[in-house]
Image (cartoon, rainbow, N blue to C red):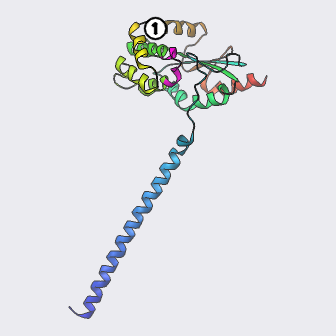
Amino acid sequence: MTSNQNKRELLRQKRKEQKRRKIYTTAIITVAVLAVIGLLAFLPKLLSKPADYDSSQGFSLGDPNAPVKVVAFSSYTCGYCKIFSESLEKDFIEDYVDTGKVFYRYVNMANASEESMNAAEASHCAADQNKFFEYKGFLYTYASAAEGFSLENLIRYAKSAGLDAEAFEACMLSDQYSKAYLDDRRFAQSNGVTATPTFLVNDQLVYSNELINTVEDLLSN
């Protein structure tokens, strides 16, 4: 092999090595950028505090003597109810309930299906332990899952939510709340509720997009 051929071969190898380094560097930069984007996306969730449910009593939160009373009529199988529960309720509790401005109560609107009635019964058993607000997140999460409201899964959610699972299971097996959903339904009907989510703010029925403004108007008067 001549001297010129050696030089060309070395040059080709050098170019290949430079190309490999460039590809490797680009890959590292891409991974780093994706990692930063992912961190920025999840940072608010990592920094946000969990909702404070220490003031819960059954289905209620906050000071019963608060100037504004809000009753939320909701359903675990309602998509808009799920959005409010998972995306808006925490801020509402922090801004209005934890500050003593609002006394908040949740009323579940069960439909006629066995699964929905099971979930309603489970809600009352969780409320007995003042753990309803921790528990209902699991009901919204698994509402559309196969066997999401089976007795086995409802008990599993109780364990995950920090309830006394044995007491919860005993409550469910006793059937003491098997018809409680009927009282919730009658209460909703007596207040003119025809859809979910609907909120009774003092004596006014409003939808979720009207909730904050209505509360603020009452607080300012």
Left or right: residue 139 compared with residue 202: left
* Quadrant of the image containing the N terminus: bottom left
Residue 114 seen by the camera: yes
Give the structural element (helix, strand or loop) at label 1: loop
Residue furthest to the bottom in view is 3
Please say whether residue 130 is one of the residues in the magenta stretch.
yes
Residue 143 seen by the camera: no
Residue displayed at 54% across by 6% down: 186
Along the line of sight, the residue nearer the viewer: 62 or 220: 62
Residue 68 in which image quadrant: top right
Residue 70 in which image quadrant: top right
Left or right: residue 28 compared with residue 85: left
Residue displayed at 67% across by 27% down: 96
Q: How many marks?
A: 1
Image coords of residue 204 (percent x, y)? 67, 16
Which residues make up the magenta segment? Answer: 126-134
Residue displayed at 51% across by 17% down: 129
Few, some or many C-alpha atoms within 10 Å of disc 1 (few <14, some 14-19, many ≥20)? Answer: some
* Quadrant of the image containing the C terminus: top right
Image coords of residue 179 (percent x, y)? 45, 6
Residue furthest to the left in view is 1
Along the line of sight, the residue nearer the viewer: 193 or 163: 163
Along the line of sight, the residue nearer the viewer: 192 or 169: 169
**What's the amino acid at mark 1?**
Tyr
Task: Give the residue number, with chain letter if any, for mark 1.
Answer: 177
Please say whether residue 168 is one of the residues in the magenta stretch.
no
Image coords of residue 195 (percent x, y)? 54, 17
Query: What is the chief secondary structure element of the magenta stretch?
Result: helix
Along the line of sight, the residue nearer the viewer: 80 or 119: 119
Image coords of residue 159 (percent x, y)? 42, 24
